[in-house]
Image (cartoon, rainbow, N blue to C red):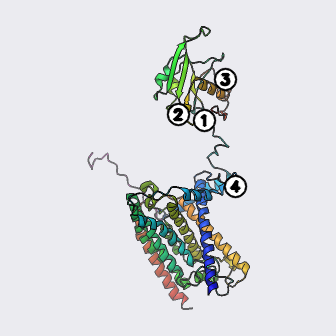
Amino acid sequence: MRADDPKLMRIEPPKLTLAERFFLPQIAEGLGVTGRHVVGVAFQKKAITVQYPEEQHVPSPNYRGVHRLNKDEHDRIKCVACMLCATACPAHCIDIVGASAPPSWPDREKYPESFVIDELRCIYCGMCEEACPVEAIELTGLYDLTGLSREQMIFDKTKLLSVFDATKDAEPMKYAAPPPGPAPETKMLPSPLD
Amino acid sequence: MLWVAIGILLKILVVVSIALGTVAYLIYVERKVAAYAQDRVGPNRAGKELGIPFGLLQPLADGAKMVLKEDVIPGYVSRPLYMLAPVIAIVAAMIGFAVVPFGPVGPNQIMNFQIAPNINIGILYVFAIGSLAVYGIILAGWASNNKYAFLGALRSSAQLISYEIPLGMSILGMVLIAGSLDLNQIVNWQDRRVWGVVVQPIGFLLFLVSAFAETNRLPFDLPESEQELVGGYHTEYSAMKFGMFFLGEYLHVITVSYLTVLLFFGGWSLPFHLLNQNQIGFLSAVFKVMVLLFKVALMILFIMWVRWTLPRFRYDHLMDLAWKSLIPLSLVNLVATAAIVQLIYSSR
C-alpha cells in the first residue's frame, strides 16, 4: 500500500480538552468509582467473593467438574464399554476394560469390568460426555476435588458410581428424559470424596 | 539536663514504637482498602479462633512470617552494601519524625509534642532526610547485581531528584506566608488565620503530587514496578530485609501525611477556632493530638485510595510531569506568593 493511497484513512488521536490535560477531573472521577466500590463492600456487603469453607459457590448448571458414571433405573451401570469416551478423550485419562455382560442383562453385550479416570490428567473438556451414546458418563458440578496423593486422584468404577449416588438428586441426568417442570437449581452437595 | 535527656529518650521510644505498630496496621488497612476497591473482602481470618473480628491479628501473623522466613542472600550480591541498604531505608524514614510535631508545641504548653522541639529549620530537615531515603533504594539496586533491581534504582534516583524540586518549592509558598520554617509556627499561623489549603491551593496540589512521587507510591511506584521490574530494587531481598523496605515505605507515608496536614490542613487546629494555640490545658492537648491523628489517618486513607485508583505512569510521562508541568507551575506559584506577601503583608 502506498502512502498516498486514497483508501488509506488517517486516524488522529482525539484532542484532549484542557481539563483532560490537567488530569485532575479525570482523577477525581476515578476516585469516585473506586470510592463507590469501597463503600459498597464496606457498608453494603456488595463483595462478589465467597467466604469459601463457610459459604460455597454454586456453579452454573453446565459447569464441568468431577465425572460420574450414571446408573439406570435397575441400579445397573449404564455404560456399555463401547470405548467412545476413551477414544474421544484428548488427555487419554480414561481406561476401560470391557467384559461380556452377564446373561441377566439382556439389553447389552458388554459392560465395563473396570472404568478408571485419572482426575489429574483430565482437562475437564466434556468430550467424553458428548461422545457417550448411552448417557453413561457425565460431568457434575463438584469442583472441590482434592486428594493427598496422585493415587487417590485416580477414580475407579466404584468411586465414580458413588459420585452419581451423591449428586443424582441435585443434578438429574442431563440427557435422559427431562423431568417435568423447571429443573431445580443445582445446590451445594455434600462432598462425596471423604 | 538528665531529666530532659530521659524525657527525649522516652518520647523517641513512644513515637518509634507507635509508628512501627501503626505501620503494621497500615499494611492491614492497605490490604483491606485494596480488597474493597476490588470488590473483595480482604484479610478476615487471623484471630478468628481467639474471637478477634475482622482479621485484626493479620499484622502479627505477617510480622511473624517476615521474621521467621528464610533470609536468602544471593551469592552474587556485594554483601556490605546489600546489608546496609534496608537499614538506611528504615533509619532515613524514621529520623524524619524527629521534627514532626504530633501535638501542640510551645513554651507554655504542658508538654512539647515533638522529639526535637522548636527547631527553626524543621521542614528543611525533613526534606534533607527525605532525600537520604533514596540512598537505601540506590544501594539496594546497586548491591543486588541484578538488572531489574538496578533499573529500579536508576528510575528511583531520577524520579526522586526530579520531584525533590517541586516538593521543596511547593511548600515555600506556605513558608513565606507563615514567615517561618518551623512547622509549629506554620501551624500557629494557620490557627490564627486560615488553613494552608485555602491560601495555597496550587501549592497543596503540587505538594500532594510530588509527595506521592517521593514516597514511591502509585501512581509513581516506578522503582518497584512489579510488572516490568519484578519488584525493582527489592527483587533480591527476602524475609525481614524486604520487610524493612516495606516498613520504610509506610513510614514515609506517615511522614508525608503528617506534613500535608501540618502544612495545609491546619495541624491540630479546627475550623472556627474551636482549638487554638492559647489553650494550654491537659485536655486541650489531648484533643489537639487526637484531631491531628484523625486528620493524618484521613490523609493516609486518601493516599491508599489513590493507589487503588490510578495506574502507574509511563516513565517519560513521569519526567514530563515533573519538569514540564510541576516545576514551572511551582515557580509561578512561588513568585506570585512572594509578590503578594511582599506587597500586601509587609505593608500592613
Q: Secondary structure at mark 3?
A: loop
Q: Residue B340: x, y in percent? A: 51, 84
Total numbered badges shown on the rendered structure: 4
Q: State the residue in front, B57 or B167.
A: B57
Report which quarter residue A179 is drawn in: top right
Name the amino acid type tagged 4.
Answer: Pro
**Same chain? Circles 2 and 1:** yes
**Same chain? Circles 1 and 4:** no
Q: Secondary structure at mark 1?
A: loop
Residue at 57% across, 56% down? B65
For disc 4, the marked residue is B53
Circle 4 residues within 10 Å: few <14, some 14–19, many ≥20: few
Q: Are marks 3 and 2 in contact (CB under 8 Å)?
A: no
User: Up-down: is B71 above or below A169?
Assistant: below
Q: What label sits on residue A150 in the rendered view? A: 2
Residue at 65% across, 80% down? B104
Between discs 2 and 1, the one toward the N terminus: 1
